[in-house]
Amino acid sequence: MIRLHVNIDHIATIRNQRGTRYPEPVVAAGLCELAGAHGITIHLREDRRHITDRDVDLLRQTVQTTLNLEMAATSEMLAIAARVKPDMVTLVPEKREEKTTEGGLAIGTPQVRRSLKAAVKKLHGAGIPVSLFIDPELADVRAAETIEADQVELHTGDYCNALPGPPRDRELARLLAAAEEADACGLILAAGHGLDYTNVQGMLHLPGLKELNIGHAIISRAVLTGLDEAVREMLGLLWDFEEE
């Protein structure tokens, strides 16, 4: 079964846009879970542009499925994770000026790998499994194994942005190869970024895929249909595939 984790960052974005107390991310998380989501994903950024420390604390107390905390591998965030103890941490790159995460972790240099390995060790010491958000490159998958991550989440943005036909086929081939390498390395496989109701089915053929992280598409659909229906529609696409 492929698990669906719903990223609710944009619920907080809407709230923060006007400085109100609503919409409430905790309520949104509960609605996603009631609709069948297997987990809730949130990204606590350095600038707190959407999810806040208060949100993290409340969601840790209320999420009944899996709470996945995306964060940069900074000393501040590592301390927060050790205190809050989410069910999983996904280490992601972070740039102050970006609108959303633009790509996977740059783990090609020994210095970066050493830094990430130290972060993973600290999180493991706190009893927290770790996923690395990486581009679908074989070298990056192998590096994730040496860093001793438990899971990799393949960045699907290039696939989602590619035009249908040969360009998208090439990106899907990259993802397939990376998925096979993750399986060979004994890494749990997840995928996410830019996935929506029209392109997600391409991901369902990735060997060993266990989890999808989807946020913007579901929250956007929810504006028109409601959060319960938006989550159920996405789950329906996953379940239809599994019944084939």
Image (cartoon, helix red, strand yellow):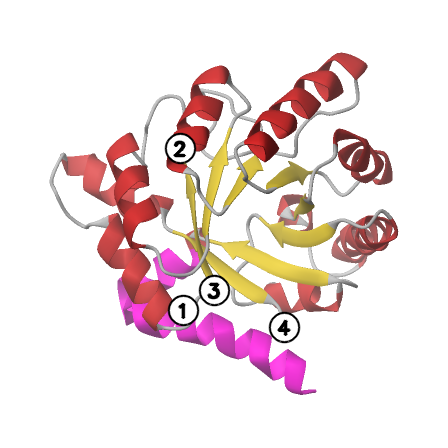
Q: What amino acid is found at the position of numbered circle 4 in the picture?
A: Met
Residue 170 rendering spot, x and y as whole percentages = 82, 52
Q: Residues within 10 Å of mark 3 (few under 14, many from 20)?
A: many
Q: Residues within 10 Å of mark 1 (few under 14, many from 20)?
A: many
Please give the residue where the numbered disc 3 appears in the rendered image: 38
Rendered residue at 60%/83% (across/down)? 240
Where is residue 54, by image quadrant? top left
Question: Alpha carbon of mark 1 to alpha carbon of mark 3: how far?
Answer: 11 Å
* Highlighted magenta segment, given as a residue range: 217-244
Q: Is residue 26 above or below residue 224?
A: above
- Front residue of 36/156: it is 36
Please give the residue where the numbered disc 4 appears in the rendered image: 1
Question: Alpha carbon of mark 1 to alpha carbon of mark 4: how far?
Answer: 16 Å
Q: Which mark is residue 44?
A: 2
Q: What amino acid is found at the position of numbered circle 3 in the picture?
A: His
Magenta region includes residue 194: no
